[in-house]
Amino acid sequence: MKIPKIILSRPKLVVDVKCPKCNSNYVAALPIIETTCKNCNTKFETNAEINIYFSAAKKLLQTISNYNEVWLLGERDNSDVFHTDDLLRPRSSFEDDIYHTMLHIKHNFEDQNCYEVSKITSEFDDDYRKLCGICGTCQDCVTCIKCDKKYLPAEVETRQGKQKRYKCPECGFRNYKKTFINKLEDKCPYCGSNNIKKTSFHSDQKECPKCHSKNDKPPRRVPVYKLVIKRQKRNVIREE
């Protein structure tokens, strides 16, 4: 039975979603939400950061119910600086949040008395994401869903500062998607921006899901906090 890994990070607002095509259920993160002030009725956008523990709790419970063992990994800062007297000591506020989230999870599962819970260790692990060397997306221009026109959104001045307005100059349609670039170069071939991003995908995949190019480059090694949770022998799920 393959051991699943849960990557702890500071996510944005998460919601339950269901794919209309394959009916897969999973959790999606929303980077920005629109809200209205209850005091003055001002509409504005805000980042939707939430607690690391609560974002991971549901996924952890779902996973441990189907597996005998789960690894929790929290990426550390990519730095060569370590405290020789205590390799686990956090070196930033983000690491501190990751470490204390693991402590919370560790104590929670130990108190249940039906799991074997390891110590938190500092190790190296393969990055769970790969970057495609062929394709990617432009972070500045967008593509109209209706007529496939590539365009830069208009910027307008509002009371809350500059805001982007998405309206296709060709057909007037407002729905859009990120502009996909088949072959990455230094600049976007449609708007000339150098703000481009490589397609990322799970390191277990053998090819890029967008352009289907083979990516034989091994994933990078990253420093992580690691916590292992196992079912006690009396609760082990037997493989058929």
Image (spheres, rainbow, N blue to C red):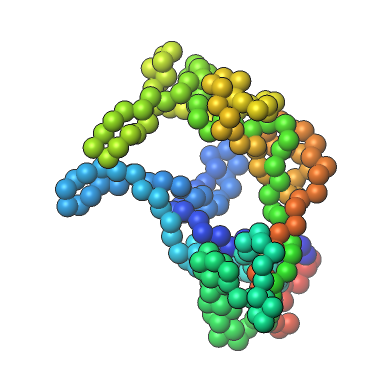
Which quarter of the figure has residue 3? Answer: bottom right
Which of the pair 114/189 is nearer the observer?
Answer: 189
Q: Is residue 69 above or below residue 134?
A: below
- Determine the residue positioned at 53% across, 70% down: 96
Visible residue check, residue 32: yes
* Spot occupied by residue 110 in the image (x, y as percentages of width and height): 59, 84
- Determine the residue positioned at 51% across, 59% down: 10
Q: In this view, does 129 lie above or below 180?
A: below
Visible residue check, residue 228: no
Which of the pair 127/115 is nearer the observer?
Answer: 127
Q: In which quarter of the image is the C terminus?
A: bottom right
Farthest residue toward the right?
216
Q: Quadrant of the N terminus?
A: bottom right
Which quarter of the figure has residue 137? Answer: top right
* Spot occupied by residue 121 in the image (x, y as percentages of width and height): 69, 75
Is 28 positioned to the left or the right of 74 in the image?
A: left
